[in-house]
Image: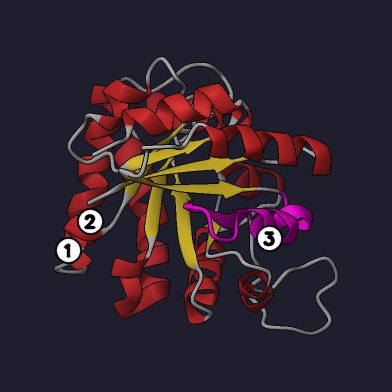
Amino acid sequence: MKKLIAGNWKMNGDNASNASLLDAILNGLTGLDGCDILVCPPSLYVATVAQRLNGTPIAVGAQDVSIQEKGAFTGENSAGMLRDVGASYVLVGHSERRQYHHETDNLVGEKAQAALAKGVTPIVCIGETLAEREAGETNAVVKRQLAAAVHAVGHCVSEIVVAYEPVWAIGTGKTATPEQAQAVHAVIRAQLAAATPNATRIKILYGGSMNAANAAQLLAQPDIDGGLIGGAALKADDFLTIVRAAQN
Ligand code: 13P
């Protein structure tokens, strides 16, 4: 299976900086076709970024999606709209949305289902907080979050991507060790295997301070099928180094 290297730009960038970041990444991509690559800009820029990347190997995703198809839902974007402007992936349940927008496990599952219904691949983000890890609850939390998504998408489970992002590792410079990450990824894989015979084909990404220096070791783990990268995805050289580490 090809690995997937996904950049979550979060609420960063503008037209000028997006264009120069993409130019620099595209310039450095020659010969690097051994992994899938994705960038997720803020929703306002998804269309422009998709136009720029049309015909290139880089896919475009959004960072959130509504569970509604259309109507009086001010401020929301539907999966059909994301697809219409060129997005083929969408993050659902990022910890920042769970934390700041009080998204529940069930809502995240519904978002994953809404995306799949329009042919957009959901990247279901799960992960424990520091307090939960210290209380020994990591596996239980991750399993609970994943179970809601698996339940919501039903027989389409083999079409999702999962991202394990320990909250304590996001933006903190504290990465899970390759062993810590692999241990949780193995739990996730086992849970997926209970839901579908195709679990080995489901990509499980690691996210949380993945960078140019630690990517190779993380990506070498048997159940780590790619990365969801925040800060380091905003620097072309760092992102390219991670893409290089993910070549099959
Ligand atoms: P950082 O790579 O900045 O820690 O962010 C990870 C993340 O949240 C990606 O979705």
Say if 64 sits above or below 215 in the image. Answer: below
Q: Position of residue 41 (x, y in %)?
A: 67, 48
Task: Return the mark for residue 191.
Answer: 2
- Front one among 118 and 46: 46
Outermost left residue:
197
Q: Which residue is mark 3?
A: 51
Residue type at tag 2: Gln
Does mark 1 have its CB less than 8 Å from ligand 1?
no
**Colour setting:** secondary structure
Task: Give the class, few, some or many, for how many residues have Cα within 10 Å of label 1's Cα (few <14, many ≥20).
Answer: few
Separation of residues labelled 3 and 1 (CA atoms): 39 Å
Instruction: Say which mark, if any, is on residue 38.
Output: none
Kindly report which numbered mark, 2 or 3, lies closer to the viewer in this rendering: 3
Report the Cα–Cα distance between label 1 and label 2. 5 Å
Badge 3 density bin: few <14, some 14–19, many ≥20, Cα 10 Å: few
Identify residue type, mark 1: Ala
- The residue stretch that appears in magenta: 42-63
Residue at (22% x, 56% y) in the render: 191
Image quadrant of ligand 1? top right
Percent position (x, y) of residue 145? Answer: 42, 54
Q: What residue is disc 1 on?
A: 194
- Along the line of sight, which residue is nearer the eye, 37 or 157? 37
Rounded to the nearest whole Å, what is the CA distance between mark 2 and mark 3?
Answer: 37 Å
